[in-house]
Image (spheres, helix red, strand yellow):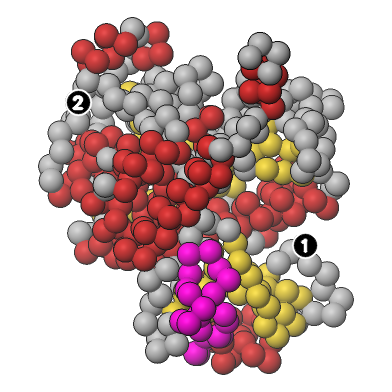
Amino acid sequence: MEKKDKQYVIEMAKKHNVKFIWLWFTDILGFLKSFAITIEELEGALEDGMGFDGSSIEGFARIDESDMMALPDPNTFQLIPWRPKEEGAVARMFCDIMEPGGKPYDGDPRRVLKDMLKKAQEKGFTYYIGPELEYFYFKDDKSTDPLDKGGYFDLIPSDVATDLRRETVLILEKMGIGVEYSHHEVAPSQHEIDMRYTDALTMADNVMTYRLVVKEVALKNGVYATFMPKPIFGENGSGMHTHQSLFKGDRNAFFDPNDKYHLSDIAKSFIAGILHHAREITLITNQWVNSYKRLVPGYEAPVYISWAVRNRSDLVRVPMYKPGHEKATRMEYRSPDPACNPYLAFAVMLAAGLEGIEKGYKLREPIERNIYEMTEEERIREGIETLPESLYEAITITEKSELVRRTLGDHIFYKLIENKKIEWNKHRIRVTTEEIKDYLPIL
């Protein structure tokens, strides 16, 4: 990927008559934050960053230490295609958050991923990611009225979303984000656009951009797009299957021509690390109360901690090797959902995989049977564990995780745990309409 510098940004801004630059960053929950500067402030911002008040950003600072600096990353400079250009174009850059003295801020999720990527780099690895984000289009944000009754890969005359997807893909490509596929998913009104594999930091920035673009295009067309993991009872939820591999230079470190699965020892230990730590990292990859409504048997979402070459009921799938496609050798982690914070999710997956490599974890043989059809006794005999069944269970497991605490750093780790306990307690005490319907007439 071509590196951009400060001079490139200034020249491009002049060339395209940019008037405003949006400075983007995320809070610990993965919500995109933005403030605008004018072109006159661009040079100073690139040099020294722009100050802002961090006290009202989730997981950032307390009132008494709220001064923050947003330092734009020139590599992320892109024009915003959907903004009017009559009075000057609008561009965006992702920022690294700094303390006023210039020290990287502990509460910045982008820093967490960058630190983890540096550790991988020290071992000679580049971490590549290809996530598949599913989402729903609904008529508005107040209900789950679908736009269609289509299914997987359907092209139906009433699939109004075909044009929405097309417009979304065109905007993503204008913003330098490569797209491989776009199609209708299994559930009514459910869709997927797959971005082309790239390095993990670029991809985390791309995920944040993708979610905004999908929502902007929907809004412009009078509908609503949601990345909520399980909006409709009885239908498949939305996942973010995450394809991953490690490269050493131009060589895929996961490929071994002599192995029966074409997986190197590095790949096997990486997969073993992810499986070993899967329960601990689930709070990060699936961070909402609603996330656990998706992680249930019977709706294509993985529940059991196992791996396979073809079987899609497993947590980790290794796509079949095609001769001549060594670079495509990868593993697919199937539990994350598209409402996670991608910086933190990619960081903990990489941490788990690297731990497997460092400690030489051994990968068990794959399970090619449908695990959902096994009895509980068979699963116990095979030593197959399950992912947490609720946000509460995920919190209690992650709270004890040395790996997650080390990866996120104390600041984000404790803030996130605190935030998730508040969320769990809020939902735990709610009386649902289902409870009223089931129990009021009989109790």
Which is more toward the observer, 326 or 139? 139
Which residue is labeled 1 in the image?
A: 82
Q: Is residue 56 magenta?
A: yes
Q: Is residue 143 magenta?
A: no
User: Is residue 403 visible to the viewer in this orientation of the structure?
Assistant: yes
- Relative to 30, is 190 on the left or the right? right
Residue 299 spot, x, y in % from top left? 53, 21
- Amino acid on which the number 1 mark rests in the picture: Trp
Which residue is labeled 2 in the image?
A: 364
Give the alpha-carbon distance from disc 2 to disc 1, as whole Å.
49 Å
Local packing at callout 2 (Cα closer than 10 Å; few below 14, some 14-19, many 20+) is: few
Residue 339 spot, x, y in % from top left? 55, 46
Which is more toward the observer, 265 or 305? 305
Instruction: Say which of marks 2 and 1 sits in front.
Output: 2
Compared with residue 279, is residue 103 higher up or lower down, i.e. above or below? Answer: below
| Disc 2, SS | loop
Compared with residue 101, is residue 439 higher up or lower down, i.e. above or below? Answer: above
- Amino acid on which the number 2 mark rests in the picture: Arg
Q: Which range of residues does the magenta coloring cover?
A: 46-68
Compared with residue 321, is residue 441 higher up or lower down, i.e. above or below? Answer: above
| Disc 1, SS | loop
Which is more toward the observer, 122 or 419? 419
Residue drawn at (37%, 59%), measured in percent from left and top? Answer: 414
Residue drawn at (52%, 47%), measured in percent from left and top? Answer: 423
- Relative to 433, is 290 on the left or the right? left
Q: For residue 18, which quarter of the picture? A: bottom right
